[in-house]
């Protein structure tokens, strides 16, 4: 847990043990308890005063610790984190037009990226498999034929607003269907991963499919994205999957969209500030439609 002097609270956790919703559930429970302002009837337990623990650290171990601290500092300094509280509208307005908020935001992310880099990229969205026993996640591939048609069409002066709106609806509809397939166990990413691991565990050569350039390109995710819904105004951050990529997490509220953006400072091709501005412009332009 992280408690700051200005009253903000947070948590830093390693992703292996749980997905975002589990952590958000913990946070919502804590915040709901605080809102109730209940008085505890039991008296605080008496405990002994804390004592400082003094460790005997050899010079060799101290050197290893110093190196670990140095490497951690380098990693922290390389990460550019930005938070967006977009107040022009939220998920209610999107729903009023019969569109999925998740798919709509994904298309805004696609448009923001395309306007910066002038090309689409493989995009990963986490799809929950928690409805299944031992289920974790599968991959929703956000970049599609429909999304590319929309991103290219948005800035095409020869297209009318009505035509652009139809492209947006088609892209959102396609993404919504793909999402429904994935969360109902019809995704392909974990299935293929299982086959790959089975081959390696049984001493087989890596199947040719996984060596194919098209497969490698389709799984080089320059955008790692996730929707983590929380009724409170929580920002959830994670780093990019690739050195030249972005990490994006969003928490749609009724009348506001909360988005976190991460990138690496060492990469000259990516910049969280530039992406934030492009995303704001994309969300505004999509509302205009």
Image (spheres, rainbow, N blue to C red):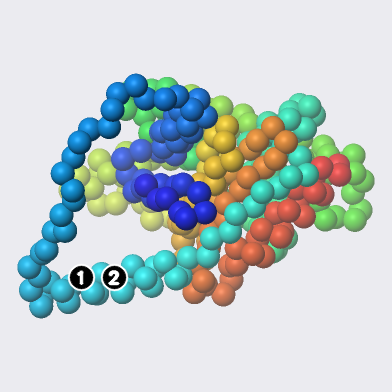
Q: Name which residue lies at 15% across and 54% down.
A: 51
Residue 5, compared with residue 256, is above or below; it is: below
Q: Name which residue lies at 44% across and 47% down.
A: 10
Position of 214 with respect to 153 (left or right) is: left
- Label 2 element class: helix
x and y percent of residue 75 in the render?
Answer: 39, 68
Res 193 → quadrant: top left
Tag on residue 69?
Answer: 2
For this rendering, which residue is in front, 217 or 22? 22
Position of 41 with respect to 155 (left or right) is: left
Q: Name which residue lies at 20% across and 70% down.
A: 65
For this rendering, which residue is in front, 286 or 52? 52
Position of 135 with respect to 200 (left or right) is: right
Instruction: Let me know if residue 218 appears in the view.
Output: no
Instruction: Let me know if residue 90 appears in the view.
Output: yes
Residue 23, compared with residue 214, is above or below; it is: above
- Label 1 element class: helix
Query: Is the residue marked by circle 2 packed among few (<14), some (14-19), or many (20+) residues within 10 Å?
Result: few
User: Circle 1 is placed at which residue position?
Assistant: 65
Marks 2 and 1: in contact by CB < 8 Å? Answer: yes
Q: Name which residue lies at 90% across and 56% down.
A: 157
For this rendering, which residue is in front, 181 or 83? 83
Q: Quadrant of the C terminus?
A: top right
């Amino acid at each position: 847990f992280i408690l700051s002097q200005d009253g903000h609270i947070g948590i830093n956790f390693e992703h292996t043990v749980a997905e975002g919703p589990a952590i958000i559930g913990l946070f919502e429970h804590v915040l709901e308890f605080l809102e109730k302002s209940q008085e505890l009837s039991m008296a605080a337990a008496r405990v002994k005063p804390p004592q400082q623990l003094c460790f005997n650290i050899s010079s060799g171990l101290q050197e290893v610790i110093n190196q670990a601290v140095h490497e951690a500092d380098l990693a922290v300094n390389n990460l550019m984190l930005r938070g967006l509280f977009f107040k022009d509208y939220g998920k209610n307005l999107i729903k009023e037009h019969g569109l999925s908020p998740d798919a709509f935001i994904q298309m805004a992310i696609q448009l923001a990226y395309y306007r910066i880099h002038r090309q689409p990229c493989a995009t990963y969205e986490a799809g929950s498999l928690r409805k299944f026993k031992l289920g974790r996640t599968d991959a929703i591939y956000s970049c599609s034929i429909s999304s590319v048609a929309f991103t290219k069409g948005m800035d095409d002066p020869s297209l009318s607003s009505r035509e652009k709106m139809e492209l947006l609806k088609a892209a959102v509809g396609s993404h919504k269907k793909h999402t429904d397939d994935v969360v109902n166990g019809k995704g392909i990413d974990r299935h293929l991963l299982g086959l790959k691991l089975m081959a390696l565990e049984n001493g087989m050569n890596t199947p040719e499919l996984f060596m194919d350039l098209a497969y490698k390109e389709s799984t080089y995710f320059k955008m790692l994205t996730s929707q983590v819904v929380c009724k409170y105004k929580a920002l959830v951050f994670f780093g990019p999957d690739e050195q030249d990529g972005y990490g994006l997490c969003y928490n749609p509220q009724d009348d506001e969209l909360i988005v976190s953006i991460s990138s690496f400072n060492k990469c000259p091709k990516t910049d969280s500030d530039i992406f934030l501005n492009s995303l704001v412009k994309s969300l505004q332009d999509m509302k205009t439609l």
